[in-house]
């Protein structure tokens, strides 16, 4: 395919290839790899193939994550991102063009390593190798997703996001490349399997397939964020779909052998997953006054749905599942009511902090989390045991009157959010 | 030609608690060159970014050639080019590759991209620098490249934010010529600038923004434009000359300013000849006749001619 044809097919990919695969760099990579492999060979390592796989790990996860994040951060720094946002390209093409194009240099290096593998001492497991490759893609996709998310918080931010994105990318690759890789190797030795929906699946295969699905979700997230950048209205559908997938995924671990878990357990665990993902989305999304105003001004339900924050439908789902859990006899209603109060309190507190604090909102939220979820409950527990703790934190078998505590907190947080809104809503 | 090539209705844009655009509405006809003027902070750049679909307004609508920019931003992007007040060029790519990339992201056919890149480079006098890295170009040349990138796909609407900043006088003159050429080729153009004299060279319309509130479109040329102002230099009593001008064809609003006569006149060169002959027959000692200039500035400052 000629450069022009590729440019037409995916301009972002061709642009990245122009920048990444310059003649000098194309020569430099094999030279560096040759030096590394020759050095390892001369040092007499037994399993050279395994070491080549480590090089692939280094290239794709450590370096690749940085390149993926840089492919966006550099554009913002150079002022070219606004030019890209004027593009008529579709967000999917831009997403994969940026993801694969921005990291093409390390994939070039990884390809060279794969070509070398059959000719060096030792052998690598093909599933392990495939997991390393997919894990590398996961690290890169995570890094790109993180910088896109950070850009939503502060579009003028030029630097500093790359390292955070790279670190989170490494964490995303851990299931396939870090402890899990070691674990899966050990598990293979023991004949280890994973039970999921009653099926016994070898751990390495399970890890590989799961990582592929994770990459697909990450890719959807990137494309969705780029779509927003290209001027389209947001929509909570992608995150709601992700939540439903995660609920279904985690349910699989409850089905052990031929046993079907009680309905209340299924509902309760689903509520827990939905609530966790509500917090994730709430903390990973900025709160713009104009977005709330758009939601309030929306003229029809379709438009209202488009402007709903991603966490809101998931939060409603979590509450509905929690209520269904109580109805199915899973937990006492007092505990559920206390949890619901704190759920509302937390949402209102995050909204208030986002509206009132200009900077360091993440730090402030961390301090609040430590205070409300650890320090205060511990102090109350120390003073008066569970009976007193229940006034501030959900506790099993608590007296119904203690619900006043959590609900007063929720009401106070909602009032604070309302004050923040009135102060910030402007005209 | 549609009368409403660009149609903006009730545009509201807010930065935090500050309202940058407040219920801004206007229409721009196809084939016009509109000077977007206003003081610093009036909301000119915000308005251009809303027109380009880079910013989503709180309320209102923007339609370009019938396409709702908010509903179909990518379709609108293919029809418009936006030269922003920063360069936005890829420093590590050559001029040619910068232009090819700009053509590609706007969905140009692969067979047309190369020719389009060459045409755009030629239009901004960068033909001899096609293989140079953008990062090696001077500030002025990078500005030209940014302009070329914005128009390489021959958009129907070209938005330009301070296009002349950073350009030397010669390049500014070339830019004026380029804007006229693009306009004659059918492009509708909106240019934001602080330099009103420069805008006057090529603008057919003026869109004035004051503190993001009132957007008013004034016609500068064409049949509905106000008559241009001329100044008559003379020797002797201007009051006699003023009396002599009464009844002259296509002359209106005569007034004495600093011993000379300023008046509105919408005649052709032959009409000017007839006017001069008429004045000389009246015994008026004419020393000069010239347009006053600063028409746009006067219009902007509220001194409508």
Image (spheres, coloured by chain):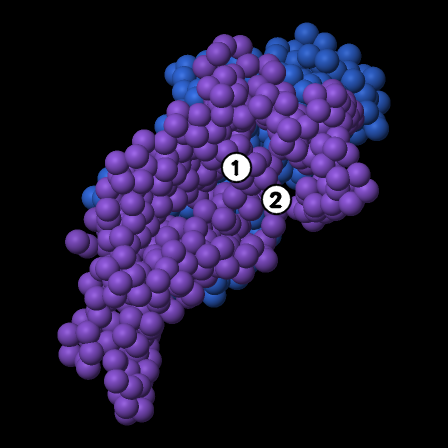
Chain colours: A purple, B blue
Residue A154 tag number: 2
Residue B103 location in percent, x, y? Answer: 34, 43
- In this rendered view, identify the residue nearer to me: A378 or B129: A378
Is B114 positioned to the left or the right of A152 in the image? left
Is A165 above or below relative to A274? below
User: Callout 1: few (<14), some (14-19), or many (20+) C-alpha neighbours within 10 Å?
Assistant: some
Q: Are marks 1 and 2 on the same chain?
A: yes
Tag 2's secondary structure? loop
User: What residue sits right under mark 1 in the picture?
Assistant: A276
Is A231 above or below relative to A41? above
Chain containing the residue with disc 2: A
Chain containing the residue with disc 1: A
Q: Residue at x 44, y 25 (%)?
A: A264
Residue A212 location in percent, x, y? Answer: 29, 48
Residue B100 location in percent, x, y? Answer: 32, 49
Q: Quadrant of residue A364?
A: top right
Q: Is residue B16 visible?
A: no
């Amino acid at each position: 395919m000629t450069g022009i044809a590729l440019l037409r097919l995916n301009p972002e990919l061709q642009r990245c290839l122009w920048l990444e695969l310059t003649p000098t760099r194309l020569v430099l990579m094999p030279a560096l790899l040759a030096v590394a492999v020759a050095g390892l060979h001369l040092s007499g390592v037994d399993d050279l193939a395994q070491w080549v796989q480590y090089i692939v790990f280094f290239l794709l996860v450590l370096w690749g994550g940085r390149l993926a994040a840089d492919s966006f951060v550099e554009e913002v720094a150079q002022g070219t991102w606004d030019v890209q946002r004027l593009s008529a390209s579709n967000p999917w093409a831009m997403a994969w063009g940026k993801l694969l194009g921005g990291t093409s240099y390390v994939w070039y290096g990884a390809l060279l390593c794969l070509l070398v593998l059959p000719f060096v001492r030792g052998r690598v497991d093909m599933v392990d190798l495939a997991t390393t490759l997919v894990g590398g893609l996961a690290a890169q996709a995570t890094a790109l997703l993180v910088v896109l998310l950070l850009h939503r918080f502060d579009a003028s931010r030029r630097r500093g996001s790359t390292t955070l994105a790279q670190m989170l990318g490494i964490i995303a690759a851990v299931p396939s490349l870090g402890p899990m890789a070691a674990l899966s190797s050990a598990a293979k030795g023991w004949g280890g399997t994973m039970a999921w929906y009653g099926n016994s699946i070898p751990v390495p295969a399970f890890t590989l397939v799961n990582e592929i699905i994770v990459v697909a979700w990450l890719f959807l997230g990137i494309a969705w964020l780029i779509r927003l950048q290209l001027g389209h209205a947001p929509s909570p559908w992608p995150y709601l779909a992700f939540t439903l997938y995660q609920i279904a995924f985690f349910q699989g671990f409850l089905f052990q052998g031929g046993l079907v878990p009680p309905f209340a357990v299924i509902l309760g665990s689903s509520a827990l997953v939905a609530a966790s993902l509500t917090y994730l989305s709430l903390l990973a999304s900025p709160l713009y006054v104009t977005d709330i105003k758009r939601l309030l001004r929306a003229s029809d339900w379709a438009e209202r749905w488009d402007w709903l924050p991603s966490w809101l439908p998931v939060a409603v789902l979590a509450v509905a599942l929690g209520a269904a859990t109580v109805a199915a006899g899973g937990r006492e209603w007092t505990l559920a009511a206390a949890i619901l109060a704190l759920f509302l309190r937390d949402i209102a507190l995050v909204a208030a902090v986002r509206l009132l604090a200009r900077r360091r909102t993440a730090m402030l939220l961390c301090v609040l989390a430590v205070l409300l979820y650890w320090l205060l409950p511990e102090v109350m527990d120390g003073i008066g045991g569970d009976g007193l703790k229940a006034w501030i934190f959900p506790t099993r078998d608590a007296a119904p009157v203690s619900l006043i505590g959590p609900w007063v907190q929720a009401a106070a947080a909602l009032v604070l959010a309302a004050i923040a809104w009135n102060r910030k809503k402007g005209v | 030609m549609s009368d409403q090539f660009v149609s903006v209705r009730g545009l509201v844009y807010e930065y935090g608690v500050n309202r940058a655009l407040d219920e801004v509405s206007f229409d721009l006809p196809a084939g016009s060159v509109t000077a977007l003027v206003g003081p610093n902070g009036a909301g000119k750049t915000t308005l251009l970014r809303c027109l380009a679909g880079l910013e989503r307004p709180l309320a209102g609508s923007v339609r370009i050639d019938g396409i709702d920019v908010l509903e179909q931003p990518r379709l609108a992007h293919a029809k418009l080019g936006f030269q922003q007040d920063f360069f936005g060029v890829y420093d590590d790519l050559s001029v040619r590759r910068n232009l090819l990339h700009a053509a590609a992201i706007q969905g140009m056919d692969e067979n047309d991209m190369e020719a389009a890149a060459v045409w755009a480079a030629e239009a901004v006098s960068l033909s001899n620098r096609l293989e140079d890295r953008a990062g090696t170009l001077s500030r002025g040349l990078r500005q030209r490249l940014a302009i070329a990138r914005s128009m390489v796909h021959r958009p129907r609407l070209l938005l330009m934010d301070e296009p002349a900043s950073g350009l030397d006088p010669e390049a500014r003159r070339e830019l004026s010529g380029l804007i006229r050429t693009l306009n004659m080729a059918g492009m509708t153009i909106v240019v934001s600038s602080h330099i009103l004299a420069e805008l006057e060279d090529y603008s057919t319309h003026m869109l004035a923004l004051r503190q993001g509130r009132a957007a008013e479109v004034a016609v500068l040329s064409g049949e509905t434009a106000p008559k241009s102002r001329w100044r008559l230099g003379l020797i002797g009593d201007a009051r006699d000359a003023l009396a002599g001008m009464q009844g002259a064809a296509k002359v209106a609003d005569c007034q004495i300013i600093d011993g000379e006569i300023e008046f509105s006149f919408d005649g052709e060169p032959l009409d000017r000849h007839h006017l001069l002959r008429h004045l000389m027959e009246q015994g008026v000692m004419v020393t000069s006749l010239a347009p006053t200039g600063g028409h746009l500035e006067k219009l902007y400052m509220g001194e409508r001619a």
